[in-house]
Amino acid sequence: MAQKSLNKVILLGHLGRDPELRYTASGKAVATFTLATSFQWRDQDGNEQDKTEWHRIVAWGRLGEICGEYLSKGKQVFIEGRIQTREWEDQDGNKRTSVEIIANDLIMLGGGGQNQSRPAQEQPRRQNTGGSRPASTGRRSDDYYPPPPEDEIPF
Amino acid sequence: MAQKSLNKVILLGHLGRDPELRYTASGKAVATFTLATSFQWRDQDGNEQDKTEWHRIVAWGRLGEICGEYLSKGKQVFIEGRIQTREWEDQDGNKRTSVEIIANDLIMLGGGGQNQSRPAQEQPRRQNTGGSRPASTGRRSDDYYPPPPEDEIPF
Amino acid sequence: MAQKSLNKVILLGHLGRDPELRYTASGKAVATFTLATSFQWRDQDGNEQDKTEWHRIVAWGRLGEICGEYLSKGKQVFIEGRIQTREWEDQDGNKRTSVEIIANDLIMLGGGGQNQSRPAQEQPRRQNTGGSRPASTGRRSDDYYPPPPEDEIPF
Amino acid sequence: MAQKSLNKVILLGHLGRDPELRYTASGKAVATFTLATSFQWRDQDGNEQDKTEWHRIVAWGRLGEICGEYLSKGKQVFIEGRIQTREWEDQDGNKRTSVEIIANDLIMLGGGGQNQSRPAQEQPRRQNTGGSRPASTGRRSDDYYPPPPEDEIPF
DNA sequence: TTTT
DNA sequence: TTTT
């Protein structure tokens, strides 16, 4: 039995491409896109160096649909998620491994993006999986207790 | 209309006292306890300095009940939550303000704690608010998509 | 002797006012400002509710100067820091307590802000405390190892 | 020129093996080890499912030496770091990619570990890179301002 | 009021 | 492949 552990990723960067929105056979939405972050440092000669890291982001369900609708290449977003390694076989039958960030929260930021009013989503919406909260990224789960009425606070 | 924002706190420390478990009039559980973290630095004379910060933690619902059952003075825990300021009036009618951390996830760690097998919870369980997952801290909400069967992955 | 612990706060929100930049007697810069985050939930009648939380941010040294120079009311920022409680006495000699977020990293985001090109900093710069990295928020400390040259990687 | 971004990973889990401590040609220490986290969910039949994620951790310099000295298989640790992809060629000349977590902070927790008093470090210490704080993980960088003397607070 |  |  696995003991509780933590696997949390927090990213803030820009999309390298428009998200791709797909659906599983059972109709669940999933968006994928890449996000750039950059790491800066000063080398031994005192020169600024810079390396871009590309993160592969996966967003399932309602959050994926929101990504498909509102995000586009260049947009700046904050993402919270977890690291997940996925194994697959390439065409030669070799075992390959992909590391992806499974997003569970996302905040769209003002910066970047070219076509602000992006043409409506091409992909059909087969099914509105999960949740009735329209413009939300589904972050308010039951675990997030609101501030209760004052006379409800017993301390 | 409020734009999306982020208010996240991550703490790892030890409980200063046993949690207090109470219930609202409507039967919702809420546990409160304090958690110590310490900040170390070296002063200008090169001496190690140390300051303890006491955080007031509030855990609602099922998570609160788990705190009441399994945590005790001295135990080491990891907590994720949000900062919440609450206003109240003291006995002289002065406006006072309390800052609390509303926990939404918690990991119990091995360290600390005096009475490992704590006597069973004194407080009666009036109501099992929220959730059917008994030994969980309620973290697996709908937002956390599991790894789907391989033939379900469309990318 | 204190054991290692963790006290981390991550905020993303908008400034409620222009930062105030002050200097200690010894010439160290310190900026203070408030940051709004909002918490949304759906009440039992299914109506969207919203509560704004105001965080008091404190940024010392070079980071404080950057806040004084580049931030203004309405700007959207990401902040990482720690919670710190400070005790003081009000004019009646009563012990009061303030909870502040001591920032140690900050990312300026595109959103918000009224006067993009804010008039140059009014406060004199008494002393350039800490660090020679001009436009940086000082995040690249020694703890952040850059990617080494490939032939330097022994694994 | 890269804009500021964020790439942060927070993990809490157990080591899969003893760390390996190596040194670069220039004498810089680097420890590597794997860390397990687990993700739990309930499948459509209501059964608890569990998947272990193995993270490859890299710790440079003083932090790496501390890992080599104090960590061992089974130990529970909290790690903060960043994701870094590294490209290399396998023996067939194929481009391969490794995703690693570059640690920049680490907290040792009580749980796990088999040989509490592990035999002293086998690897020679070629060079004590970075830092004079012996038992510290080097987390108190210049960015972490201590609480100043009360008469130094100008607000 | 915690912990090593 | 992003961004300033």
Image (cartoon, coloured by chain):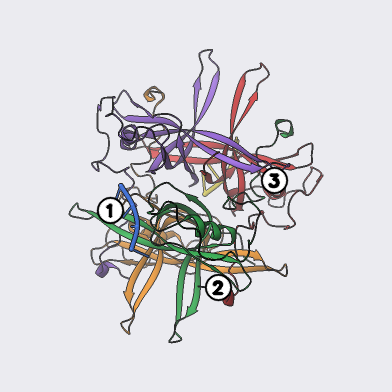
Chain colours: A red, B green, C orange, D purple, E blue, F yellow
Contact (Cβ within 8 Å) of mark 2 with mark 1: no
What label does residue A153 carry, if any? 2
Q: Which quadrant would residue C152 be assigned to in this image?
A: top left
| Front residue of this view, candidates C123 and B141 | B141
What SS does tag 3 mark?
helix
In this rendering, the label closer to the viewer, 2 or 1: 2
How far apart marks 2 and 3 lie (CA) works out to 37 Å
Residue C139: percent from the left, percent from the top? 39, 48
What SS does tag 1 mark?
strand
The outermost residue toward the left is B45
| Front residue of this view, candidates C37 and C131 | C37
Does residue A147 appear in this view? Answer: yes
- Name which residue lies at 55% across and 36% down: A54
In this rendering, the label closer to the viewer, 2 or 3: 2
| Front residue of this view, candidates A97 and C107 | A97
| Front residue of this view, candidates D115 and A70 | D115
User: Could you tell me which chain the residue with mark 1 belongs to?
Assistant: B
Amino acid type, mark 2: Ile
According to the picture, the residue beneath numbered tag 3 turns out to be: A64
Amino acid type, mark 3: Gly
User: Could you tell me which chain the residue with mark 3 belongs to?
Assistant: A
What label does residue B41 carry, if any? 1
Q: Which badge, 2 or 3, comes first in the chain's sequence?
A: 3
Contact (Cβ within 8 Å) of mark 2 with mark 3: no
Circle 2 packing at 10 Å, graded few (<14), some (14-19), many (20+), is some
